[in-house]
Amino acid sequence: MAVLEKIRRQTTVLILIIGLALFAFIISGVFGNDTGGEKVGSAVAEVNGEEISIDEFRRKVESTSRQYGGGASSIQVVNSVWNQQLRGAVLGQEFEDLGIDVEQDQIINFIKSNPSYSQSPQFLNESGVFDEYKFKEFIANLKANNPQQYQLWLQDEKSIIQRAKEQVYFNLIKSGVGATLKEGELDYKLANDKVDIKYVRVPYTSIVDSTIKVSKSEITSYINEHKTDFEQDKSRDLQFVYFEEKASLTDENNIKQKIAGLIEGEKGFRAAKDVAAFLDSGDSDAKFDTIYKAKKQLPTKFADTLMSLAIGDVYGPYKDGNAYKVSKMVNRKANGSVKASHILIAYEGAQRAKEGTSRTKEEAEKKAKDLLKEAKKSGVLFSTLARDNSDGPSATKGGDLGYFQQGQMVPKFNDFAFGNKVGAIGMVETDFGFHVIKVDDKEDVVQIATLVRDIEPSEETINKLFEDATKFEMESIDGKKEFTDLAKEKTYDVKPVNKIKELDENLPGLGAQRSIVQWAFNEGTDIGEIKRFNINNGYVIAQLTAKHKEGLMNAEDASATVLPKVRKEKKAAQIIAANSGKSLEDFAKNNNVSTLTASALTVKSPTIPGSGREPLVVGTAFALGKDATSGLIQGESGVFMLTVTKKEEATALDNYSTYANSLKSSGAARVNSAVYNALKEGSEIIDNRASFY
């Protein structure tokens, strides 16, 4: 396992490094227009008539899966590759239509602007700058000596070129994004013009929902009027009963008794001199952990008890998570963990000094000594000094390094931290520079040996579970009783799952269960069909309960969303009809509500205290003159009527360039996602992933 893990880590690093290679003169055709061999086999997708080969797609899935190293499920990897391939296809077609390509100098500039490439230590020169020739040497060596990794690079180069083209494409669009001074002035006024109002609101909650009848045809009409809001993907509904393979109460008690029986006696855990050998003998499901731990690293529920044990004392059995444990105090180190803060003053040539550091060693020492004097003064916050002066990565945390044990820091730093009392402040020099150190806290650490027995179901329990699952499956398939009725009779919990998509994999309480989703979407699976699935830790008896077609939702599917909207519209119409022509005062009086006020409302923040966001109401107020009264307004939370009591225009500025530039920046920031989403939405995409995964 250790060898496999080492190979996996090295492979990941190599793939990452290979992704940095970008020089055409090293690799034949690296930056040419040829995108590789012909696509063969079935298509996993079509984008505007252009096929994405399943063979190419699978190669990328395999490569990406290796990079994740088991950190993602298979369908997560598939979806990740899908997003990359779809983006590449949609934008690639756009690049081809526009004739966008990239040259070597543009690609080099792309690398230099991307820290993941330009800051790789392997390719930096003595000045810490990306060295093209070091990179060239690496790729040449890779091509000559490691053909397999070189082939991976040939795959990666396509994505690198794609990103470089994207940078060119989006920069071209961003260059056309701007804002005039007049637009800047409008933005300023929308945020700073203010209006005060006196208003009456009759909330929709004043009418009981049950009094408003909404028909199926009204729901259908609403759907047809708002079609874009009610488009749905193909989906399925199902329900299931989960027979979980877990220990019974009898199993737990038996495990507790067995571990308790290992404590006493001449050969018991308490008397054991060599705890490592005892735990390795097979009586424990966990080996001896030699690491010393602080209180906060112990199980929270038992930390106080464990820390109070004397050397040789035993505590347990106790249940921690899904195991019974017995713990024995092996050793204790007083003040074995130190919490410290520091201010690092680096100088040119110091280890890991930031690029551009020009301070000499003498200058660094003088600055450190000055800060040491300052830090020792009464009332001075060490964290503030560190935040403002430290060259170390902990500066943002006020220099806080957290807790550490002996040997984790460089020797001089370690010796100061462990050799001085809490509150001590001093200075040491290391290869990183000069450190002003403050000892913040110290705590004991302990070495505890723990005998562990996992709580697992017995063979008897497993057999009983299989019998129960099989019996329920057969009886539910028999059909004499409905699935839910049969489960209720047997006191089994039925879990409904609605609107699962074709490429979903996670089911509530079960985790990733791709096989169940695939079964639900199989054309041969009929509504009402029941099937048993053997999964990790048990069995699932599932029933398909509904199929939903792609396209516009029907009234039943959309009712949960549409009903409140239609009901609100009917309430608004009812309130308006009952109060038409009334004055502000009569509107309040006849509906038994108070007249309220709101001040300093702006168009950009159209929120009325106590009523929430009401853009139409606030917009109406700005459209009226001072002392003018509106008609009845159908707002978000109720029907309003208002009178403008004050209007205040923002102070005119000499120049609105700051606001214009802000609009330009925010517009440019939206370009990448907005343009791609628009292109994707306008594309004809046929997705066949579910046929292969």
Image: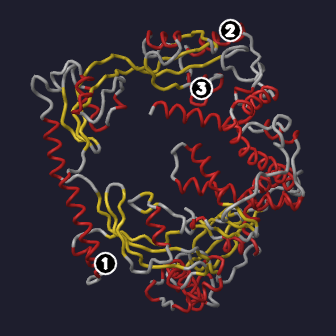
The residue positioned farthest toward the top in the image shown? 362
- The x and y percentages for residue 60 are 64, 51
Q: Quadrant of the C terminus?
A: bottom right
Q: Quadrant of residue 151?
A: top right
Look at the numbered disc 2 and give the secondary structure of its residue: helix
Which of the labelled discs sits on residue 477, or is there none?
Answer: 1
User: If you read the primary sequence from the N terminus, does the residue marked by circle 3 or circle 2 appear first?
Assistant: 2
Earlier in the chain: of badge 3 and badge 1, it is 3
Q: Is 568 above or below relative to 7?
A: below
Q: Give the SS element for disc 3.
A: helix
| Callout 1 secondary element | helix
Q: Which mark is residue 384?
A: 3
Residue for badge 2: 366
Name the residue at the left extreme. 265
Residue 150, position as x, y percentages in the image:
71, 38
Q: Amino acid at mark 3?
A: Thr
Q: Amino acid at mark 1?
A: Ile
Amino acid type, label 2: Lys
Say if residue 656 shows up in the picture.
no
- Distance of label 3 from label 1 (alpha carbons): 71 Å
Residue ID at (60%, 84%):
223
Above or below, 427 relative to 537: above
Q: Residue at x 21, y 33 (%)?
A: 283
Color scheme of the displayed model: secondary structure
Is residue 175 something that shows in the picture?
yes
Q: Mark 1 packing: few (<14 Cα in 10 Å), some, or many (20+)?
A: some
Of tags 1 and 2, the one toward the viewer is 1
